[in-house]
Amino acid sequence: MGFNLKSIKTVQTFDYEVKDEQGNPTGVIFTLAGPNHPIRKAAQMAANRKLIASARKTGRVELPDPEDSEAQRVKDLTAFTLGWRGYADESGEVAFTPEAASALYGDPELLWLSNQIDAALGEQDRFTKRVGTN
């Protein structure tokens, strides 16, 4: 009997545990939108449409300004973060809001965190799950 490829699915979300500077788990869990999540798909489609419109207008693909790219990265990371748990600061537990996420991702001293979340979002295997048996 063959292998049922449909037994492995792309899931819409994934819980990612943030690691500290030495790669140890922190207990802070971020819920991230997978590649099939409507928010992430809409953002990708919008980015593609923008590139296509630029190419149609000028006849070439124009690279964005680096500052614009960084602002878009913060915006995307914020949109693709659906929640968190276990995150506290000096004042106590921090509730998830898009504004709180944007503040984290936009803080230059927390570049390590935005890099880590960005990398996790790019690891497609994190968003696949076996749902049956072969």
Image (cartoon, grey):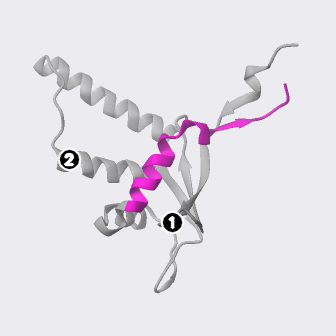
Q: Which percent across, then down, holds residue 123?
A: 52, 40
Q: Where does label 1 land, which residue?
A: 22
Which portion, as a residue range, is magenta? Answer: 112-134
Secondary structure under tag 2 reads helix
Residue 24 or residue 38, whichever sits in front = 24
Q: Which percent across, then down, holds residue 26?
A: 58, 69
Q: Where does label 2 land, which residue?
A: 68
Q: What amino acid does circle 1 point to? A: Gln
Residue 109: image tag: none
Q: Residue at x 19, y 21 (%)?
A: 55
Q: CA distance from mark 1 to mark 2?
A: 31 Å
Left or right: 46 in relation to 84: left
User: Residue pushed farthest bottom?
Assistant: 91
Number of callouts in the render?
A: 2
Q: Which percent across, then down, holds residue 131?
A: 78, 34
Asked whether residue 117 is drawn in magenta, I would say: yes
Residue 128 appears in the figure = yes
On the image, which quarter does residue 84 sit in?
bottom right
Q: Which mark is first along the chain, 2 or 1?
A: 1
